[in-house]
Amino acid sequence: MNPDIASGSMDHQLTLTGIVERAERFHAGQAVISRRPSGAVSRTTFGACASRARRLAAALRSLGVGVGDRVATLMWNQSEHLELYFAVPAMGAVIHTLNPRLFPDELGFIVNDAGDTVIVVDESLLEVFESFRATRDFAHIIVVNHSGEAAGTLDYETLLAHAEPVEWSALDERQPAAMCYTSGTTGRPKGVVYSHRALVLHSLVSALPDQLAVSARDTVLPVVPMFHANAWGLPYAAALAGARLVLPGPRLDPESVLDLCANEHVTMTAGVPTVWMGMLAALDAEPDRWKLPELDRLIVGGAAVPQSMFEGFDRHGLTVVQAWGMTETAPLGAVCRLPEHLDTGGQDERYGYRTRQGVASPFVEIRARDDNGETIAWDDAAMGELEVRGPWVTGSYHGGRGAENFTDDGWFRTGDVVRIDPHGCIRICDRSKDLVKSGGEWISSVDLENQLMSHPSVAQAAVIAVPDDRWGERPLAVVVLRDNATASPEELRDHLAEEFAKWQLPDRVEFVAALPCSATGKFKKSELRTMFATA
Ligand code: AMP
């Protein structure tokens, strides 16, 4: 540092409290709309959510929640979840969103690994909660939309009614604000902990015009759940920008989503390809049923977007924009916006570009390295594993697990194999991580294989992802039986069902005499994919 000059800029902390206060002060009247499990729609505002968040924080404090304590949520996209998104980080605690689709055993592991002290559950998810409740001694269980029947629980509304609003205290921007678990290739899910600074910078950048473009003129419908990578950060970006927020609850069938888009004049929505596949089929079947003149863009990510989806929505005058990201990147990592020079390009060239995963978002640095550890050229030919670093990219997992996902020089290894064009636009070609992504949710091939191989009749098993029109990918198990042993596909699926949720079970089980192996003794999954992908 040169002693002659010092920065005069204030050292102002970038905390989510700034977003919550802005929503309360400047966007107080902006609507927050929730579709309830019953289908009824309830309406509130950012102002009401932010002022209720002050009372919620007081209530949580009186229950003993302090700085750094983890408050778990088992909820849909609903206004109370937004209140928790506001209150928990702003009071210095950490909001931990739980995915209700996980198997009870996984949820039990996750709440214990995170050390959750209090859990807030929507009444419609009490059955899921009961399935893992015994695994952890929660200090308090709070129920939203409570009919008062669950023993040993507190009612969310009663707590709020008896609390006095708090004034927010100053926080350090590097304090943890939120956490979310992601499935690993093998072993248990790993916790990603986001700092205030990471989420504030993520909100600012995702609101930029060539990123997700969130403005006060928008009505944003995150179909992506608030328990999956913070609904891609959209609740915070909408609160920051002052966009109307439409929260769809659990009803994500195409008709319900299209009804919401039409009735609430949604301008922007976001979710995984599986959801949009269904919407496209519904639109194709009844093109005149929904009037969507305001719907300006559908942000689609979480899995590759096929060209047929771009073409299909183009036919209805709706624009799909592909984005790439991960739980570990908070999640925005890249967005694919058509460059201006392609406005006049040919159809094929435009679709060729739009099916790519896009250009890294500002402040997200990318590189890719080949099997020899050499950084690949950006020539759109060489392939390597994508590595990223940046202010909202995780630098470690909770508890220091998964160290192998980070390089010695501080980059995060994504497990996505890419080509990069000379302008830095990524195309995902393969995946080095051994996982199946079905309907936007991960299934660990390795865990399925281990469970299959624990069956007395199974000698070897390999699980591969095969393309599926509806879910993007589905798991397929290839099994070698022990000599003279027998087992039916149903028997093996029953054996898997002891450890896995129904949607995680392979649809197909194929029996072979031997599995193809590489020189190092690993199963050659690429060969299996060629054998079975289209069979
Ligand atoms: P998650 O942490 O569950 O959000 O999953 C992140 C992973 O999803 C990435 O590492 C990719 O493998 C995959 N993914 C996300 N977005 C895309 C995309 N646009 N195209 C292809 N794969 C994607």
Image: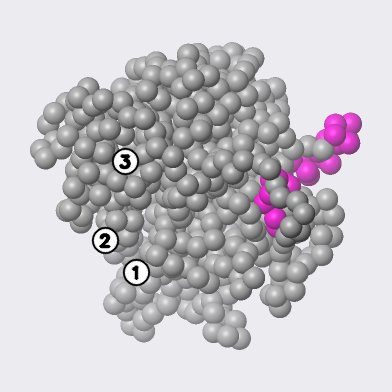
Q: Is residue 100 visible?
A: no
Cβ of mark 1 under 8 Å from ligand 1: the answer is no
Q: Quadrant of residue 351?
A: top right
Marks 2/1 in contact by CB < 8 Å: the verdict is: yes
Sequence-first tag of 2 and 1: 1
Q: Secondary structure at mark 1?
A: helix
Q: Secondary structure at mark 2?
A: loop
Q: Quadrant of the C terminus?
A: bottom right
Any mark on residue 74, and which? 3
Give the residue drawn at x 71%, y 69%. 369
Q: Is 257 left, or right, of 365 in this rendering?
A: left
The image shows residue 513 at horizontal and vertical percentages of 47, 78
Q: For label 3, count other residues whose C-alpha is less than 10 Å away and answer few (under 14), some (14-19) or many (20+).
A: many
The image shows residue 520 at horizontal and vertical percentages of 58, 85
- Would you say residue 365 sits in the magenta stretch? yes
Which coloring applies here? Answer: one colour
Sequence-first tag of 3 and 2: 3
Sequence-first tag of 1 and 3: 3
User: Please, what is the three-letter code of the amino acid marked with disc 2?
Assistant: Glu
Give the residues in magenta.
340-366
Q: Is 268 left, or right, of 462 in this rendering?
A: right
Residue that label 2 marks:
498
Measure how far apart labels 1 and 3 are at the Cα level.
28 Å
Work out whether 500 lies above or below 117.
below
Measure how far apart labels 2 and 1 are at the Cα level.
9 Å
Residue that label 1 marks:
451
User: Please, what is the three-letter code of the amino acid marked with disc 3?
Assistant: Leu
Q: Quadrant of residue 97?
A: top left
Work out whether 293 lies above or below 129.
above
Q: Is residue 17 visible?
A: yes
